[in-house]
Image (cartoon, rainbow, N blue to C red):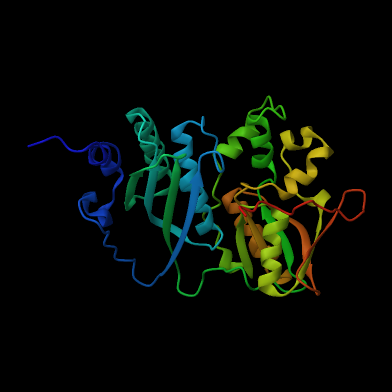
């Protein structure tokens, strides 16, 4: 028998060990999945391209983990639990086996942490940069997915964790900022999906922050037909972000890759939110409120003046 072509040898060596039962051993061109009874499926897909979403020199294991985590973050923003994923890789043909080995090792590490498995996908060669795409599948109780629509005047605007670390981390990796702690670069390369929050218990609308706080809050405003006002001084910043100084505040508020939760919370639900926060040990901070008016985001600077931005967040086009 002749040796396997390199593409199939790579799949056999590095990706078949990641496959769950639905993948059929990666020996077919489909996956067959039976969703858990009594659940709704939640699906999302994100792509990452070298030089756009990650730096070409980033370690391949961290690239893999970021790819999986940004998709897990989409599930977290709906209150869903992860089930599995499909993976597509377009790699330059000169890519060495060691890259695939490290990439698969990163996936294996996070598969164990988050309880997911590979269900299938595709590999191809490209003359351009690495292009990676992942489709995540999750489950939620019927009718309990928390969508973007639902924000109303009087609801509080809440975020999880800290905002702006990843955007500043990219500045660090590009040599524009220093951070002796290493936290900012780590937050850029390895986001923390905020899985486990029972969002349907306290959130009227939700999403994750991927393209910048101001821009993504605008999505909730448009979906709900309301405006939002946020207090920049209330936005939670990490110690390294604070150390960078006020000149970087606008970057924190509009930079992408936070992958924190952004929520609209009715006043009567804040006790339930506090209970979930204590249980999961991830802070949720009130940074403003939704108000009547056309769908727009108004940001008040720490000194009390309105803030303006050259652009509110990341856009590919």
The answer, for residue 265, to whether it is visible in the render is: no
In the depicted structure, whether residue 18 falls above or below residue 216: above
Question: From this viewpoint, which residue is outermost toward the left?
Answer: 1
User: Where is residue 166 drawn, in percent x and y?
Assistant: 64, 41
The answer, for residue 39, to whether it is visible in the render is: yes
Residue 60: quadrant of the picture? top left
Residue 184: quadrant of the picture? top right
Residue in the image at 32% along x and 50% along y: 122
218 to the left or right of 121:
right
Q: Quadrant of the C terminus?
A: bottom right
Residue in the image at 64% along x and 36% along y: 170
User: Where is residue 298 drawn, in percent x and y?
Assistant: 82, 61
Question: From this viewpoint, which residue is outermost toward the top?
Answer: 180
4 to the left or right of 287:
left
User: Where is residue 265 drawn, in percent x and y?
Assistant: 69, 66
Q: Quadrant of the N terminus?
A: top left
Total marks placed = 0
Residue 222: quadrant of the picture? bottom right
In the depicted view, which residue is nearer to us: 81 or 137? 137
User: Where is residue 217 drawn, in percent x and y?
Assistant: 70, 61
Residue in the image at 51% along x and 71% along y: 144
In the depicted structure, whether residue 50 falls above or below residue 282: above
Residue in the image at 75% along x and 53% along y: 311
């Amino acid at each position: 028998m002749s040796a396997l072509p390199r593409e199939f040898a790579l799949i056999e060596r590095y990706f078949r060990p990641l496959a769950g039962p639905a993948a059929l051993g990666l020996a077919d061109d489909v996956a067959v999945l039976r969703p858990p009874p009594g659940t709704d499926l939640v699906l999302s897909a994100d792509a990452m391209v070298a030089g756009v979403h990650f730096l070409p020199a980033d370690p391949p294991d961290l690239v893999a983990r970021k790819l999986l985590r940004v998709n897990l973050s989409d599930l977290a923003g709906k209150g869903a639990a992860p089930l599995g994923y499909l993976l597509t890789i377009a790699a330059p043909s000169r890519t060495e086996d060691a890259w695939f080995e490290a990439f698969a090792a990163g996936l294996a590490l996070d598969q164990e942490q988050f309880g997911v498995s590979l269900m299938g996908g595709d590999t191809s060669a490209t003359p351009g940069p690495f292009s990676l795409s992942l489709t995540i599948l999750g489950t939620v109780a019927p009718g309990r997915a928390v969508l973007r629509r639902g924000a109303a005047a009087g609801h509080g605007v809440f975020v999880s964790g800290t905002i702006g670390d990843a955007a500043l981390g990219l500045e660090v990796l590009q040599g524009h900022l220093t951070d002796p702690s290493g936290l900012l670069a780590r937050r850029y390369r390895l986001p923390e999906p905020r899985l486990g929050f029972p969002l349907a218990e306290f959130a009227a609308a939700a999403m994750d922050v991927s393209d910048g706080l101001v821009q993504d809050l605008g999505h909730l405003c448009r979906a709900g037909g309301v405006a939002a006002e946020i207090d920049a001084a209330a936005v939670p910043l990490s110690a390294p972000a604070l150390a960078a100084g006020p000149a970087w505040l606008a970057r924190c508020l509009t930079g992408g890759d936070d992958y924190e939760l952004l929520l609209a919370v009715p006043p009567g639900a804040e006790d339930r939110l506090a209970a979930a926060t204590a249980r999961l040990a991830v802070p949720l901070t009130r940074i403003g409120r939704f108000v009547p008016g056309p769908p727009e985001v108004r940001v008040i600077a720490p000194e009390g003046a309105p803030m303006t931005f050259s652009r509110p967040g990341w856009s590919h086009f």
